[in-house]
Image: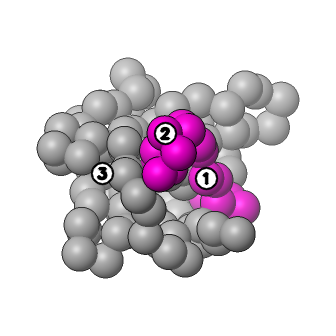
């Protein structure tokens, strides 16, 4: 059973920064992409940032220019640097690994989530 673990959440003031990290408990046959999603109370889960195996990043409109996604291929980890935080960034942040198995099945592996609260 693959375990995906996020870390780095917490409380930040508006305009502040936080860095989230994510790691998987094992390597995958083929990694398609890695990403960060978030879900605020009463709202649907939304994509924050994705990074492809070629290191091409994609960002949600609300975080462009403020958040940066990066990956360490050797360690199979993905990080999210969040700058210029706003109260509306408050949410539970989830990490996701999208992979292909040796049997050519596409699967998503999600972390348990880490709380980010932006408040003065």
Looking at the rendered structure, the secondary structure element under dot 1 is: strand
Looking at the rendered structure, the secondary structure element under dot 3 is: strand
User: Tag 2: Cα neighbours inside 10 Å, few (<14), some, or many (≥20)?
Assistant: few
Residue found 55% across the figure and 77% down from its top: 25
Assess whether mark 3 and mark 2 are in contact (beta carbons under 8 angstroms): no
Asked if 78 appears above or below 69 in the picture, the reply is below
Give the magenta-colored segment's residue range: 98-120
Q: Mark 1 or mark 3: name the one nearer the start of the chain.
A: 3
Q: Which mark is residue 104?
A: 2
User: Tag 1: Cα neighbours inside 10 Å, few (<14), some, or many (≥20)?
Assistant: some
Where residue 113 appears, as percent x and y from the top left, is 68, 59
Q: Residue 56 is drawn in which quadrant?
A: top left
Q: Is residue 78 left or right of residue 109?
A: left
Is 60 a magenta residue?
no
Q: Residue reaching furthest right?
A: 42
Residue closer to the observer: 61 or 21: 21
Q: Which mark is residue 109?
A: 1
How is the protein colored in the picture? one colour
Q: Which mark is residue 69?
A: 3
Is 111 a magenta residue?
yes
Q: Nearer the viewer, mark 1 or mark 3?
A: 1
Residue found 72% across the figure and 26% down from its top: 44
User: Tag 3: Cα neighbours inside 10 Å, few (<14), some, or many (≥20)?
Assistant: many
């Amino acid at each position: 059973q693959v375990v995906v673990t996020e870390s780095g959440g917490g409380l930040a003031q508006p305009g502040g920064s936080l860095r989230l990290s994510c790691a998987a408990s094992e390597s995958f046959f083929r990694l398609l992409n890695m990403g960060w999603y978030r879900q605020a109370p009463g709202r649907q889960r939304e994509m924050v940032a994705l990074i492809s195996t070629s290191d091409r990043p994609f960002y949600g409109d609300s975080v462009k220019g403020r958040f940066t996604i990066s990956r360490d291929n050797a360690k199979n980890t993905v990080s999210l640097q969040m700058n210029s935080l706003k109260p509306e960034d408050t949410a539970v942040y989830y990490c996701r690994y999208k992979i292909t198995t040796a049997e050519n099945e596409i699967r998503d592996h999600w972390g348990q989530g880490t709380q980010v609260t932006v408040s003065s």
